[in-house]
Image (cartoon, rainbow, N blue to C red):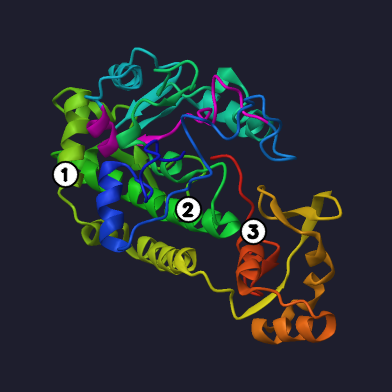
Amino acid sequence: MANCAPESEFEQLPELYQRWVEELLPGGIPREREATCFDCAMCDRGQGAPVPGMGFFHPETKCCTYFPDVPNFLVGRALSVDTAGGAALRAFVAGSAEHRAQATLLGVRPAPKIRTVYRQHKDELFGRDPDLRCPYAITPDPDAGPICGIWKQRNSICSTWFCKHVKGYTGFQFWYVLQGLLGSLEWSLAWWAIARVLENPAAALMPAQGEATARNKVSLRPDAWSFWSGTRASFYEACADAVERLSAREALEIGGMEARLHLLDVEARFARLHDGAPPERLRVASYSIVERDAERALLKSARYAQPFSAPAVLLSLLHYFDGRTTDAVLEAIHADTRVRLAPGIVRRLYDFGILELAEDAAVSPEAPD
């Protein structure tokens, strides 16, 4: 979901994550100006389909059809939010809506039935079914549709998902790996906070039942709340206080090797996001032609949902990109056709997944999981 401050030059993450990212990625993350909250680029405003083949979002939901997991320290930060979204979170914490959400020492997450329905139907219903509307969404302006009611404390998925990206697939890849980093930290820090806050954290744990994995061989006891003497709200607030004191580097230490590996990927994608030059060696990726006339062609990468509008003449030139250096390809195109292809258009073809690096993995964007 995009930053709701259109005048901002850089994308703004939730307060805690923004502080950490500024420490790790100096220079700022360019704002995703194609993804707009108050004037949703994916809703029908009478201007025709926003992007051929992508369809519309429902104006009563926009992209707010994902019910997020909220780790304990973010719950503690969001409990005081004075919106209907904050009130919904407080109700979940109090246990008055357990058919919709479960509040555990780890955080607040949707009930199993809701998670199952979403996973089974997200491909066709994401952004389109009002029954999936997020309980934290609020609608201060009916004409603008919903926005997040716990915006400054939203989780890693809601912080990094965008319907469109200024730099296409390059932008998607950056946000995808940043979500991987923040998501990894969320649950490492949630467990760490439990260990910091509970007097006897080991007593609240039990060996994982059923599908135990190397990553998660312990789980919380069903009566884990009995090992906290205060209110649930006070537990979450204590977790928030503990995590608030951490620097980004301290959070990474808690996250361990997995978090550090995620950071390496984030740093590499962040550099690509800021680099305007075409990569040294490119090849044609798998793509389709969505629309075409004598002047323009709308091309769509097999890995990325947002099409790219290009001059139709490019279609006869793409085969030149066969893994040779980009400079050699541009010279060959000019020698054979007298067309002087600008490096900027090559970069855009790469950004939108029409051209690819030989080592790029095929990862497709999708609704939040």
Which residue carries the number 2 mark? Answer: 175
Between 158 and 278, the one nearer to me in the picture? 278
Q: Position of residue 261 (x, y in %)?
A: 41, 66
Residue 106 visible from this viewpoint: no
Q: Give me the residue at 53% from left, 44% from top.
A: 34
Prevailing secondary structure class for the magenta stretch in the rendered image: loop
Residue 365 visible from this viewpoint: yes
Please give the range of residues in magenta: 56-78
Q: Position of residue 55 (x, y in %)?
A: 70, 33
Which amino acid does the dot numbered 3 rest on?
A: Phe
Q: Give me the residue at 32% from left, 50% from top.
A: 188
Label 2, label 1: how many angstroms apart (C-alpha)? 27 Å
Q: Residues within 10 Å of mark 1 (few under 14, many from 20)?
A: some
Between 175 and 98, the one nearer to me in the picture? 175
Using the rendered view, name the quadrant where residue 315 is placed.
bottom right
Which residue carries the number 3 mark? Answer: 352
Give the structural element (helix, strand or loop) at label 2: helix
Q: Is residue 317 left or right of residue 259?
A: right
Which residue carries the number 1 mark? Answer: 242
Q: Choose mark 2 or mark 3, whichever is in front.
A: 3
Q: Residues within 10 Å of mark 3 (few under 14, many from 20)?
A: many
Using the rendered view, name the quadrant where residue 360 is placed.
bottom right
Which amino acid does the dot numbered 1 rest on?
A: Ala
Q: Choose mark 3 or mark 1, whichever is in front.
A: 3
Q: Residues within 10 Å of mark 2 (few under 14, many from 20)?
A: many
Which amino acid does the dot numbered 2 rest on?
A: Trp
Q: Is residue 176 left or right of residue 74?
A: right
Q: Position of residue 22 (x, y in %)?
A: 28, 57
Between 191 and 84, the one nearer to me in the picture? 84
Give the structural element (helix, strand or loop) at label 3: loop
